[in-house]
Image (cartoon, rainbow, N blue to C red):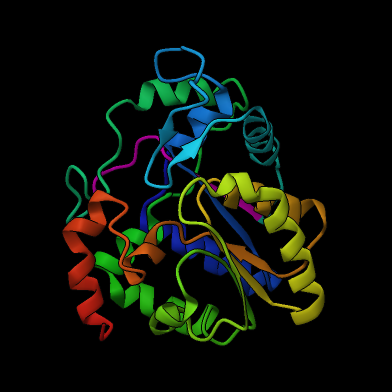
Amino acid sequence: MIYSTEKTLQIIQKKIDLDGSVYFTRYGDGDIIHMSGTDLNGKKIDKNRADGGNGTKYTPQLEKDLQTTFKIEAPNYLKAVSLFWKSEPGMSKGLFEAFPYKDKLERKIRAFTARTDWLNPVVFHYLITFRPDLFDPFCDKYIKPLNKLYIGCVNPKSLEPIFGKSHSWIETIETNAVQQTDWIWEQTQKAIEKHKPDLIIPSCGQASRAITGRLWKAKYEGSVIDFGSLVDVFGGRASRTWIKLKGDEILKRYGH
């Protein structure tokens, strides 16, 4: 079962309220496929093929990193997975509707866990589009006031309407950022030591999952929240269908 977007947000907020921090990471269809090492038809992934809006290329190291992070089980390590969720008002094909091939994805996940309850992977994408009455108060309370480290290719200045000021920024490449994973991790460690962020926002495609797992292993005590492709809206990157459909509307609302 995949929780609704509103229930997912409530779970994230409750964890922060009770414990002071939370890890929230998202596994899309590309993550699940690369984690398994085979495509939806069971064929070994072509290393030269670029997948998804981030142009990610498969590597054995990426497969290993995704498996490692996916297997983390802890109360404060929250995972969202792209399987099947009930349609919510406004959802349609290309606009947050669940993938039609969820059975194939589910079979891949069963190789790693028997767990059946997951958070919703489009929680922030959906809420900023259709429920800003929930998204904006969340950011106002849990994101904007914090000392933040942002990791991604979109300039954090353009994200200030939703996140507030980012106190440090690790600028990544736009496509296939997984090739920078080790470099990103080195820079993250330096930024933590220098700036002591309360919150890290990794928005660098599938490298985000790898970095989140390394932060957990390193016992980083702040929060880590993955907002995914939402940041592309503010960077002028129409990397997803939903951004092409609703991006201009969102930008107008936030004064862009």
Image quadrant containing the C terminus:
bottom left
**At x 65% / y 27%, what residue is drawn?**
60
Residue 138 is left or right of residue 167, and the answer is left
**Residue 64, image x, y percentages:** 68, 31
**Residue 151, image x, y percentages:** 58, 65
Image quadrant containing the N terminus:
top left
State the residue in front, 49 or 249: 49
| Total labels drawn | 0
Q: In this view, does 105 lie above or below 3?
A: above
**At x 54% / y 30%, what residue is drawn?**
58
Q: Is residue 17 above or below residue 37?
A: below
Q: In this view, does 111 lie above or below 126?
A: above
**At x 53% / y 55%, what residue is drawn?**
204
Residue 92 is left or right of residue 195, and the answer is left
Residue 169 falls in image quadrant: bottom right
**Residue 162, image x, y percentages:** 41, 79
Magenta stretch in the rendered image: 77-87
**Residue 107, image x, y percentages:** 48, 19
Residue 98 falls in image quadrant: top left
Residue 9 falls in image quadrant: bottom left
Examine the structure image and report whether residue 82 is included in the region drawn in magenta. yes
Q: In this view, does 14 lie above or below 84?
A: below
State the residue in front, 27 or 73: 27
Examine the structure image and report whether residue 113 is included in the region drawn in magenta. no
